[in-house]
Amino acid sequence: MNGFFGPLDPEGRVPPRQQTRVAAFLISAHGALARQFAFTLPLKLDAAWQTELNAQFYRETEIVSLLMRATTWVPDLALGYMAASWETAWFPTPIEGIADRSLGQAVHLATLAHAVHAGIRPAALLPVEANASDPFVMALRRIEFESGRLLQAQIMFLKGPDLVPFRAAVSATLESRHIDLRKLWSGTLESVGIAVDE
Amino acid sequence: MPFLTHGSYRIRYELDGPANAPAYVLVNGLTQYSELWRTYRDALIARGFRVATFDLLGQGASDKPTLFINQDDHVLALDRLIDELGDGPVFLSGISFGGMIALRYAIEHGKRLSGLVPMSCFAELSPQLLLIGNALRTGLILGGTGYLQDLLLPMNLSDEWLKPLLDKLDGVKRQGWLVNDIYALQNLMESFLDFQPLTPQLASIAVPTMILNGEFDFLTPRALHETLRAEISNSALVIIQRAYHAFTLEKGALTADLLARFADDVLAGRWQGNKAVWIAPEDPGGELTRFPAGYDHLRAIPVMGKLT
């Protein structure tokens, strides 16, 4: 095992089995964010910051759409139970130290989005020889690039003035989110022969 | 790969060379990782030193705190690392962001050090540095780590170094891009949002100090190093010829030689800072030259001025 996709085919494409499992994980995570942003997005925006919710919702949807079309899919029997474990990990959980339910929900969504956007770097799995003209390769690069931008909304909210009184709770929740997500991501990668440095 | 613990975080470090030798501790710049000190490790060990390198919190293989990185944590982590070195002489050197962390360590724990070498360093954010720092942070946010590297490479390295690499720059950038995460770099950059100038505390640094500054350093120009020279009593400023901010990368053999000579001079009792200004030789082993008397070392043209 090494830390990159491969072995690539003669055209520099990622093996379809690795594409399938990695794309399924990313669709699960970004799809969960898209759904949760959709539920949070009001029909009529009341505040300027809500425009960011709209942007996040559509960017997440774009990522799901992109992966569905750019991936070379192959049948994968293990995906059923793996997807079930991923999906349960995205469920909202109470945030210890934050009693206000709506604030807790916002922190849940922001910490989940931070972990997904910051902690998952799919383009870093591409070896140097990966074919830059391949749609899956380009999709992963786009997703990592867009994630870096989407992340800014989470950073601004989680570091912002509203959460200063809850800084310890927010930091602990975010660290824990990152650890949990890293575990799922590492497990997914290792299941298709990609080693992850810990 | 050994790790130190700092609170709940792990800090990756490397310690090489004879256990009873005087030690050099090298502190990374912002986008650096400890493997970039390899040339120094080899050169300093060959000169009889023990060498400690590490990834700061948020860098390389060390843990990356998700939301906040406090500069105090770097100083505490550095203190933990220096504790590992025992009681022998310790020389501390850092570049840029790492130089500032080294300065803070020297202010707080100066008695533990035998010598200090801040390189491409600053004790305060001048308006230019503040604005450039903000622009680099915006570049990171909008364009990612690769764009930040695109900005830093031409700013901090010479044409001579860049020219043969122009068609291989993606390869040069790749390792830095792989090991640096946007959120961690951003946290490191945002640790300056409440930065307080160190200048008022510099006078408390009594340890022998050699300040290294690239002749053409654009990011942290001479005036920022002059603050260190003026405030640290036993210091000397050494100008690295034809060098930019990242001269440690470009002129590794020369810089390692200067580090070794400085430590040898200090250990032999020969070092006299005297707030002097020197010009480094072009090549390792060459003679240092006094900056010509009567000329202003803060200017880029030979204008008469007086040393203060």
Image (tube, rainbow, N blue to C red):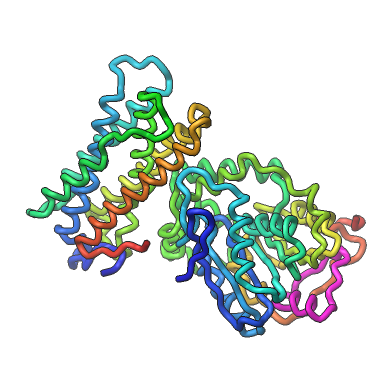
Residue B4 in the image: state x and y as whole percent: 52, 64
Across and down, in percent, residue B284 comes to 69, 79
Q: Which residue appears at 84% of the width and 64% of the height?
A: B234
Q: Which of A85 and A126 is in front in this view?
A: A85
Is residue A106 part of the magenta span, yes or no?
no
Q: Does the magenta stretch include residue B264?
A: yes
Q: Give the range drawn in magenta.
A: B259-282
Q: Can residue B159 be seen in this view?
A: yes
Q: Which of B130/B159 is in front?
A: B130
The residue drawn where x is 45% and y is 35% is: A158
- x and y percent of residue B167 in the render? 43, 64
Residue B210 image-quadrant placement: bottom right
Q: In this view, does A192 lie above or below A94?
A: below
Give residue A71's position: percent from left, percent from top. Answer: 17, 50
Tell me, yes or no, if residue B299 can be seen here: no
The quadrant of the image that shows the C terminus of chain B is bottom right
The answer to whether residue A45 is left or right of residue B78 is left
In this rendering, would B8 be left or right of B254?
Answer: left
- Closer to the camera, B31 or B291? B31
Front position in the image: A195 or A85: A85
| Residue drawn at x 88%, y 66% as measured from the top left | B274
Q: Is residue A144 left or right of residue B209?
A: left
Locate the N terminus of chain B by quadrant.
Answer: bottom left
